[in-house]
Image (tube, rainbow, N blue to C red):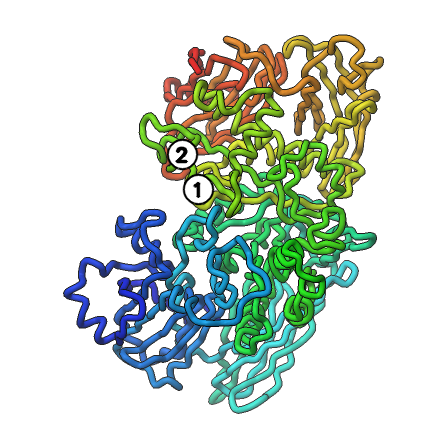
Amino acid sequence: MTDEILIPISAGWHAVQVAAGTPMSPSILHSALPAKMSVQIPAQVPGTIASALRVAGQFDYGKDNFDEVDVWYFCELDLPGNAAFLHFDGLATHVEVYWNDDLILRSENMFIAHSLDLATLAISGKGRLSLRFLAMNTQLAQRRPRPRWKTRLVEQQQLRWVRTSLLGRMPGWSPPVAPVGPYRPILLELQSPARITGKNISSKIDGTDAVLDIELTVQIQQAVPSCAINIGEHEFILDCEHLDKNLYRVHGQCKIDEVKKWWPHTHGDAALYPLELHVSCTSDKQINKQIIDLGRTGFRQIEVDQRDGDFNLHVNNVPVFCRGACWTPVDIISLQNGSNDLRHMLTLARDAGMNMLRVTGTMVYETAEFYQLCDELGILVWQDCMFANMDYPVIDEAFAVSITTEVQQFLQRTQSSPCIAVVCGNSEVEQQAAMLGQPAELWRNAFFAETLPALCEQYRPDVQYWPSSPSGGVMPFQLDTGVAHYFGVGAYLRPLDDARRSVIRFTSECLGFSNMPDDDLIDGMLNNGETPGLHPAWKLGVPRDNGTGWDFEDVRDHYMAELYKVNPASLRYAERERYLSLARTTTGEVMAKTIAEWRRSGSTCHGALIWFWRDLRPGAGWGVIDAHGKPKAAYYYLKRAMAALTVLITDEGLNGLALHVINDGQQVFEGALELNLYRHAESRVAHGRIAVQVAAHSVSKVQDYVLLPHFVDTSYAYRFGPAGHDVVEAVLYDREQIIANDFHFPQGHQFAMQADVGLRAHCSLDVDGNHTLHLSTQKLAQAVCIQIPGMLPEDNYFHMAPGNSRQVRLAVIDGKSPKPGHVQAQNALASVRVAMENTTASAVNGVVTTTVTATATTVVN
């Protein structure tokens, strides 16, 4: 369908909450509204009742339980004479739809879209469209068969019968904001000469060529049609067969020679081809033409090597280390993705070297814009179907029909998206059953074992199907076979070397930590004098597993003690700023070292997806992005560890240090590798540099001894006397430009605090208006933190070797005015003030200097 014939019904809506089960028709509700004007609010569509309350200034987390009330949406419409169909792309969840007082639709699955033929329903002219969302608790109170096992993920076990999101209904890690309302668009479709009523498009790679199979059912009002499809600049004539009355089957196989393949951005270009259907009809000796936009597609081949228990995803016959995060909605309250916000979030993910995001079974199927942007940005998608942790009643006939339609619709609407690499049946259903002692034959039912793979084969034969995450071993949660959820380093407090001992093959969920946000978010959520820690307001934003006596802040503090040799509890109440600083870098250091372990040469691991992308509410949540969309410290550590071209250090014990040069790109990398050793975090005591050449899509391991002229106990494993150095730096060069560096601290991360490490900073502005922060340091500057309000640094929380300098690009945050800020090393008492004053206008070599002064100010922690 062309955009011109689809009209969003987004304006003029109002919403009202009434007591659950109140007998009421739309006309009775409307007549009662004058007496209840205080509870009637304007509503945004698409949106939820929570987002409507937020706009009205009446929302607070936990204030309302939207599962306890009936929620009505209504608007007045004047349908044009050429109105043909009414489309509901997503209604959460049990809903009745009325035109005036006539019931025209009843739906019980928020993941199913509905299309109503207005002519069949005799709907036209002026009228009132009303949506009644029935209280979820009323539905859950109905007597139904009990599950074979119970999950702690939710409190109400009967949710297994209800096709709705678990967001807002998972105590411990999801804020209590149940999605209720028309959370996806409501659209009016106008009559058109040609209309697609069925679509099946599939693509495949055949050597260097691409093949697109297309089969459409098209409703054409005029006679003698001819159809063609344009794939980019290539045009193909399609066969057009008459089926019945004005229905035609349009089909063909299109072959493109020497196609530009679609790649994840880390490995190549995400080449896309626009698809246009051209329909020509002859009527009264005139030729009428219509162009129908079918979106864009890309051509790639996805395979998974599963030999010997492996899970190694290949794209276009190249093994890809998949890294990224478990995606969370941009806005949990409205479930909307503002186009700018969504692009910003996905661009942040791409810029962090993330080439895969997982849409988990506890959330929602994402919007069309999400998949389109992942296509464009070269981000693979691991797509769970929306099932998690529960014993779903798939043998119930009505339930089975509903969930089959749900998955079928999703696969059809995303058929052209090359970003989708894996479709997974569910999240943790097999694991939950196994951990609760169920026999193996009950871990997987026929829907996940037979129906879903058959649907994928029919509608998305180009993707890989996986039955459950995790799955694959003798036990579903076995780490060294198939797909794992790995929290050994993390919730289970294992040492960092457990990441190697566990022999991970692919972890679709890992490294969940309570990641500390920056000060601006903390100051905005706590009152003056309140501090992170045990304060009730703070703990609401700290995730925990339901029913446990610990939370993920306890997990973070455990690793803080291990890394920095401090007492986190004492720091928290005695040295607040020091505690916050170490809290931010602890999780970043742990994540980065674990990712380095899994990306090293010789690793068994082929993918790692962080749990998870963005916080669901303000606080120290699992997200590497905070609830306001700002990257946390952990994001920057991951950005360096996940880069497509980088060097990473691993400690090989008595074998010294290994330097792993990683080149994911399509071209051979030729550069130089440098190794520097420093004593007392100040004096360089050893140095070496060699030329390196790394083939495309490969990892090259370089032993530290190759770079040094004589034996040095680089890992301080032999311990023959005092250590000769406490800082190790590996630097990767492309010619003389530094591409990446990595650090290793053989005696630990605990460096003595110094009054001043010689850190200096100033900001410049070039003729194009781009800001650059110039930094230099005399001694080791540990975890350099850049805090300049209104500016987003390209890198942050990085180490600087003694005597080094670097430049960091700064981007102005939309809607923000840059203000003076500061830069501080974690091992320094002094911070450096960075002014943003436009004090000069002179240009030197194309650079306009806006500030040349930086003052060191002692900070009392």
Q: Quadrant of the C terminus?
A: top left
Quarter of the rendering containing residue 850: top left
Residue 343, image x and y in percent?
A: 49, 48
- Left or right of 630? Residue 681 is right
Q: Which mark is residue 627?
A: 1
- Dots 1 and 2: beta carbons under 8 Å? yes
Q: For the residue labelled by badge 2, is the local secondary structure a helix, a strand or a loop?
A: helix
Say if 320 sits above or below 147 in the image.
above
Given residues 575 and 758, the one toward you in this image is: 575
Residue 719, image x and y in percent?
A: 78, 14
Q: For the residue labelled by badge 1, is the local secondary structure a helix, a strand or a loop?
A: loop
The reply to whether residue 4 is visible in this rendering is no
Residue 748, image x and y in percent?
A: 66, 20
Quarter of the rendering containing residue 74: bottom left
Q: Which mark is residue 521?
A: 2
Q: Which mark is residue 397?
A: none
Given residues 776 and 592, the one toward you in this image is: 592
For label 2, the crowd category at 10 Å Cα-Cα, with few meaning under 14, some 14 to 19 and many 20 or more, is: some
At x 21% / y 75%, what residue is drawn?
28
At x 39% / y 64%, what residue is drawn?
137
What amino acid is labelled 1 in the image?
Ala
